[in-house]
Image: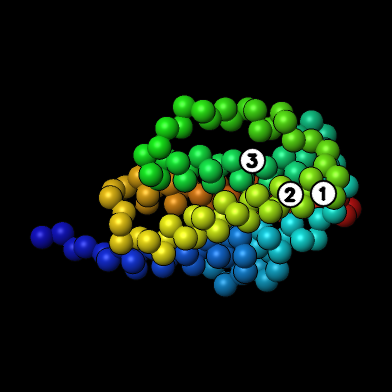
Amino acid sequence: MPRQIDIAEVARGFDFFMTETFEQVRGAYLDKGDSLFESLAQISAADASMPMGSCATIAAHVAHIDYYLRVLEDRMFGRDVSWVNWDEIWQTVGAVDEAAWAALQDDLRASYARIKGHLAGADEWQGTRELSSLMGIIVHSAYHLGEIRQMMCRLRS
């Protein structure tokens, strides 16, 4: 008989890595102060608007992470994702002022809070969609956090 893991235990593990990636370093894979929200707090709207050569801005990365969270949230619950247009978010966010920069971060925080709320209701998961979506959120967000950290390094040099 296969050994089973309580879904609440799995959810706690996902919560640990979500917190590490977005909120506060817990020592899993980031250095102190390097979580996404801690990093974004160090970035001005002007810096978030600075393109890196032909690459996207930090603001566009933040918008993309939020977009990805919303897509994967819909996927987790079997909702229609035919509305997804991956190119659009990269093309619509460029330079931002302080208000727009704050709004992008607020939107990301709201999406993140919803995902964290889903972890609290883990006893209602029905299948692998939830697990694979959460894994994707952590891995994808950590990748973009790395991109943002590299962009911050280039801005400061």
Mark-to-mark CA distance, 2 and 3: 14 Å
Label 1: how many residues lie within 10 Å, few (<14), some (14-19) or many (20+)?
A: few
Residue tagged 1: 99
Which label is found at residue 156? none
Residue drawn at (31%, 47%) of the image? 128
Contact between labelled residues 1 and 2, with CB atoms less than 8 Å apart = yes
**Upstream in sequence: badge 2 or badge 3:** 3
Q: Amino acid at mark 2?
A: Ala
The secondary element bearing badge 1 is classed as helix
The secondary element bearing badge 2 is classed as helix
Q: Residue 77 placed where, x, y %?
A: 38, 44
Residue tagged 3: 64
**Residue 84 seen in render:** yes
Residue tagged 2: 103
Asked if residue 137 is positioned above or below residue 80 in the image, the reply reads below
Q: Amino acid at mark 3?
A: His
